[in-house]
């Protein structure tokens, strides 16, 4: 089918929203895996009908589901995520050390050209890869083995590897982000890694400019500008123009530079989106108004986008994996809230439509633009 | 045959309508019962026990004959009433909100 498919992971199941290319009328399919936390669902760029879902619960652990028909049917695949060698230790909230322990898969990043190859970012932070469609998973242990593990610590959501960027022009390059350790980059297909956090300043760690320990919430990139990265950090919106070697702040006139997601326009590499959130601890929009902010200048100058979004008494959050863009022209933007709403814009954010109003708390939103 | 009652979340995962019956050779232990369960329903691997350590997951409990067997040795013999199918073996998700 031609159109848009929105993959929504929630606290109580997965949902698939679909529409034709006009993006006006939406059908909601689900819940899939009812009652389970679906941290993320993702589709293969090489085969849009190949989907992967991370299904987990505090009771029954991690399950991985795979669909070969666009989500109509699902089958379980491998769910063993075994750290290579000695798991080592990381910092706990109180500064003490405790061993790595697998909790769940936060994020899938399917290969750009092979439906059977998928990267998985997990909690406690590590990077895994399958090359057999999810039957088996193997850790890319050079990341966790970087040696800085004792300086990694969990954020409020856990010590998660939540962002995996693949470079279409340089397949040997990968960039990942961990909360709270920061950005790491590999130039050898994930074998070895180096921290990539120069320019970040975080008051929550003893040395605010330390090489690792930063609570990076999300990074985003446009495929045509692989050296330009945008970051929403625990505080501060940041930008790098040298693939993460150096970062500088572009928070500009945002009402709060705290937030979780960040996204880049599908066709304009200098147009970016964030959702400012009040913090510390409140984690709801300033003034009870849900506003997506857009910068057409790659940061610093931001415009509030409000039409169709709740502008009074709104106290929801938009989590780090819950904003995505489609590839249509004009570009579509999608956000999911902890209140269970999915808002979609078919005009680059100028106006918004509620395409699902009463889902469980939304953990993730992915968009597939179908041929 | 041994009768096993699964929580609803695991029945849905395993696509089971109703309860499970397992053929387990004597002496019947929790380890042998859970091994047989996972062999018959591979999608349940890791859901009641850690995949690597085989330790019971923290929020999972094992009951039978009105007794909590959760902390019994996995190699201890289960009650005869479970082994002969008179009483079911209950796998329970702990009451923990959510």
Image (cartoon, coloured by chain):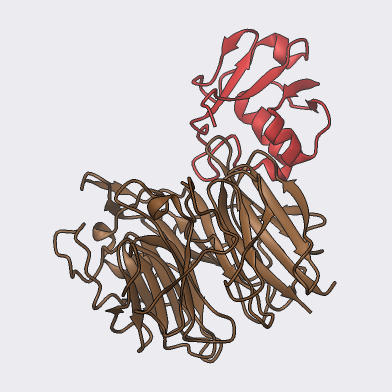
Chain colours: A brown, B red
Above or below for A230 versus A163: below
**In-image side of A328 versus B97 (left or right):** right
Q: Is residue A225 visible?
A: yes
Q: How many numbered marks have been drawn onto this rendered protein structure?
A: 0
Q: Nearer the viewer, residue A88 or A315?
A: A315
> Residue A127, image x and y in percent?
47, 65
Q: Is residue B36 visible?
A: no
> Residue A99, image x and y in percent?
33, 48
Q: Nearer the viewer, residue A280 or B4?
A: A280
> Residue A259, image x and y in percent?
39, 60
**In-image side of A316 versus A110 (left or right):** left
Pick out the residue farthest to the left: A207
Q: Nearer the viewer, residue A141 or A304?
A: A304
Picture quarter with the C terminus of chain A: bottom right
Above or below for A120 versus A246: above
Picture quarter with the N terminus of chain A: bottom right
Res B64 quadrant in image? top right
Q: Nearer the viewer, residue A273 or B68?
A: A273
Res B5 quadrant in image? top right
Residue at the image point whose x is 36% and y is 74% from the top: A184
Residue at the image point whose x is 70% and y is 41% from the top: A34
Above or below for A344 versus A359: below
> Residue A317, image x and y in percent?
47, 51
Residue at the image point whose x is 65% and y is 45% from the top: A359
**In-image side of A31 versus A143 (left or right):** right
């Amino acid at each position: 089918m031609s159109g848009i498919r929105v993959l929504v992971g929630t606290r109580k199941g997965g949902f698939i929203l679909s529409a034709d290319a006009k993006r006006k009328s939406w059908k909601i399919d689900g819940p899939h895996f009812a009652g389970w936390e679906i941290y993320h669902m993702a589709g293969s760029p090489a085969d849009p009908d190949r989907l992967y879902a991370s299904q987990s619960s505090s009771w029954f652990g991690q399950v991985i589901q795979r669909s070969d028909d666009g989500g109509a049917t699902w089958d379980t695949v491998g769910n063993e995520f075994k750290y290579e060698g000695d798991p080592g230790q990381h910092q706990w909230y109180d500064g003490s050390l405790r061993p790595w322990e697998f909790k769940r898969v936060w994020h899938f990043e399917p290969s750009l050209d092979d439906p059977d190859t998928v990267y998985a970012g997990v909690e406690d932070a590590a990077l895994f890869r399958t090359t057999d469609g999810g039957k088996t998973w193997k850790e890319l242990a050079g990341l966790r083995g970087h040696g800085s593990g004792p300086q990694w610590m969990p954020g409020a959501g856990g010590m998660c590897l939540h962002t995996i960027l693949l470079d279409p022009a340089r397949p040997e390059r990968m960039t990942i982000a961990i909360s709270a350790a920061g950005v790491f980059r590999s130039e050898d297909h994930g074998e070895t890694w180096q921290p990539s956090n120069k320019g970040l300043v975080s008051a929550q760690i003893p040395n605010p400019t330390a090489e690792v320990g930063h609570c990076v919430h999300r990074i985003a990139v446009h495929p045509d500008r692989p050296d330009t990265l945008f970051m929403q950090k625990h505080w501060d919106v940041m930008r790098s123009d040298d693939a993460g070697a150096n970062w500088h702040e572009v928070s500009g006139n945002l009402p709060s530079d705290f937030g979780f997601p960040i996204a880049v326009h599908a066709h304009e590499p200098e147009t970016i989106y964030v959702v400012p959130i009040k913090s510390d601890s409140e984690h709801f929009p300033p003034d009870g108004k849900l506003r997506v902010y857009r910068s057409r200048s790659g940061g610093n100058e931001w415009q509030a986008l409000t039409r169709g979004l709740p502008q009074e008494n709104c106290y929801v959050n938009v989590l780090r994996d819950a904003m995505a863009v489609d590839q249509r022209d004009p570009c579509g933007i999608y956000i999911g809230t902890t209140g269970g709403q999915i808002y979609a814009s078919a005009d680059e954010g100028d106006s918004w439509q509620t395409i699902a109003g009463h889902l469980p708390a939304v953990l993730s939103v992915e968009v597939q633009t179908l041929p | 045959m041994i009768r096993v009652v699964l929580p609803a979340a695991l029945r849905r995962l395993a696509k089971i309508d109703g309860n499970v019956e397992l053929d387990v050779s004597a002496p019947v232990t929790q380890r042998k019962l859970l091994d047989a369960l996972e062999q018959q329903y591979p999608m349940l691997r890791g859901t009641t026990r850690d995949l690597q350590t085989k330790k019971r997951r923290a929020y999972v409990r094992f009951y039978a004959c009105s007794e909590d067997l959760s902390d019994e040795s996995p190699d201890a013999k289960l009650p005869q009433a479970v082994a002969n199918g008179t009483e079911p073996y209950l796998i329970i998700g702990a009451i923990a909100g959510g």
